[in-house]
Image: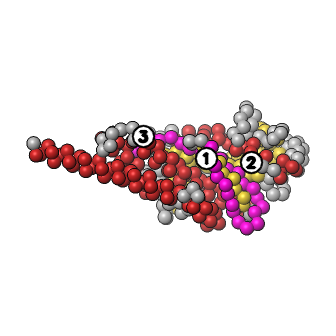
């Protein structure tokens, strides 16, 4: 078994709207997320429902994007599905990178003993370990046939889940998916810290520092919660942008705004599904960039748009009766 502190932990979460007209309740969510026969689905009822599937291991034998030369890694990636509020569907992939004790590839039974861990077979210069090179190679999205691609692993799991026979493929809002890539270094002295960047309209990158290996699972749960709320913000922004293409108080505008208000606004509860040890990070996000401030502004715009459309509808009806 590998020993020592992981050099880096790498993860990615894909987030989308469950393709179903109705939110899944507890029994349906358990059936939907039962990836492994005999393994139970984790469930939480308050303050908002949260279901997490059993974890699967995906074997990898590839290269890790690293400057100046990629590193050869062998091991497994831990994957799982998560359903928040019966509507927000997420797939996650995560692995911790360790130095191998032997400079050779071992039998697969060796790697399967530790799910979500890959070993570096060749040497990594100490200067690369100490520098941001480990994070940069992954977060920059370096691609190649033999480069570790957690995004593809996560996307395959998500695609399979979205085609589950339980789902009617009739989501109340037509919106896309987002991806959040994250890294975690171990060795923080005071507690978790983070930095976040918006790479494009749908991709975000997060760099974390955590105190010890015990915080790896918590780091993933924080990133999933962050990804869910970033997705909600992205959806409302998209819905408002699409609605602005139509005339004020029009039927087309109302058909876009109403489902978002009914089905999505009740899902906003940042930090409620984050482990206690990581909740301090939400305080920073509430200050800058101000997640809840932006959410409240967008939700208010949607409510105002619906109110104006309703008043206009009533005015038109009143005019018809007067004639």
The one of 282 and 87 positioned closer to us in this rendering: 282
Location of residue 136 by image quarter: top right
**Residue 26, position in %: x, y?**
47, 56
Structural crowding at the residue carrying mark 1, measured as other residues with C-alpha within 10 Å and reported as few (<14), some (14–19) or many (≥20): few
Structural crowding at the residue carrying mark 2, measured as other residues with C-alpha within 10 Å and reported as few (<14), some (14–19) or many (≥20): many
| Residue 189 placement, left or right of 204 | right
Residue 128 in magenta stretch: no
Q: Which residues are magenta?
A: 170-199
Tell me the distance, in whole angstroms, between the alpha carbons under discs 1 and 3.
21 Å
The answer to whether the residue labelled 1 contacts the one labelled 2, judged by CB atoms less than 8 Å apart, is no
The one of 182 and 215 positioned closer to us in this rendering: 182
The one of 41 and 247 positioned closer to us in this rendering: 247
Q: Which residue is mark 2?
A: 135
| Residue 245 placement, left or right of 3 | left
Q: Which residue is mark 3?
A: 242
Q: Which residue is mark 1?
A: 198
**Residue 166, position in %: x, y?**
46, 44
The answer to whether the residue labelled 1 contacts the one labelled 3, judged by CB atoms less than 8 Å apart, is no
- Give the mark count: 3
Structural crowding at the residue carrying mark 3, measured as other residues with C-alpha within 10 Å and reported as few (<14), some (14–19) or many (≥20): some
Location of residue 240 by image quarter: top left
Q: Closer to us: mark 3 or mark 2?
A: 3
Residue 188 in magenta stretch: yes
Precedes in sequence: disc 1 or disc 3: 1
Q: Residue furthest top?
A: 145
- Which residue is depicted at the point 59% across and 41% down? 200
């Amino acid at each position: 078994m590998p020993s020592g502190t992981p050099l880096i932990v790498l993860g990615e979460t894909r987030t989308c709207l469950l393709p179903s007209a109705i939110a899944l309740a507890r029994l349906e969510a358990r059936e939907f997320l039962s990836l492994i026969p005999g393994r139970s689905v984790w469930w939480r009822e308050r303050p908002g429902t949260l279901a997490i599937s059993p974890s699967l291991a995906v074997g990898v034998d590839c290269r890790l994007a690293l400057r100046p030369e990629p590193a050869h890694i062998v091991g497994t990636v831990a994957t799982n599905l998560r359903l928040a509020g019966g509507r927000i569907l997420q797939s996650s992939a995560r692995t911790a990178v360790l130095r191998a004790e032997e400079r050779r590839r071992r039998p697969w039974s060796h790697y399967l003993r530790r799910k979500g861990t890959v070993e570096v077979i060749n040497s990594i210069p100490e200067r690369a370990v100490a520098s941001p090179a480990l994070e940069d190679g992954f977060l920059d999205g370096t691609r190649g046939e033999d480069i570790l691609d957690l995004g593809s692993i996560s996307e395959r799991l998500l695609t399979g889940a979205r085609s589950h026979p339980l789902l009617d493929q009739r989501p109340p809002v037509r919106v896309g998916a987002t991806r959040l890539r994250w890294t975690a270094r171990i060795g923080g002295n005071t507690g978790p810290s983070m930095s976040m960047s918006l790479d494009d309209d749908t991709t975000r990158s997060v760099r974390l520092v955590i105190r010890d290996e015990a915080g790896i699972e918590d780091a993933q749960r924080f990133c999933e919660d962050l990804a869910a709320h970033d997705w909600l913000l992205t959806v409302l922004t998209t819905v408002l942008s699409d609605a602005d293409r139509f005339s004020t108080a029009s039927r087309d505008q109302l058909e876009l705004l109403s489902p978002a208000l009914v089905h999505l606004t009740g899902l906003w509860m940042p930090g409620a599904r984050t482990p206690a040890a990581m909740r301090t990070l939400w305080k920073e996000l509430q200050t800058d960039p101000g997640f809840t401030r932006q959410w409240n502004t967008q939700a208010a715009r949607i409510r105002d748009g619906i109110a104006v459309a309703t008043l206009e509808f009533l005015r038109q009806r009143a005019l018809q009766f007067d004639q």
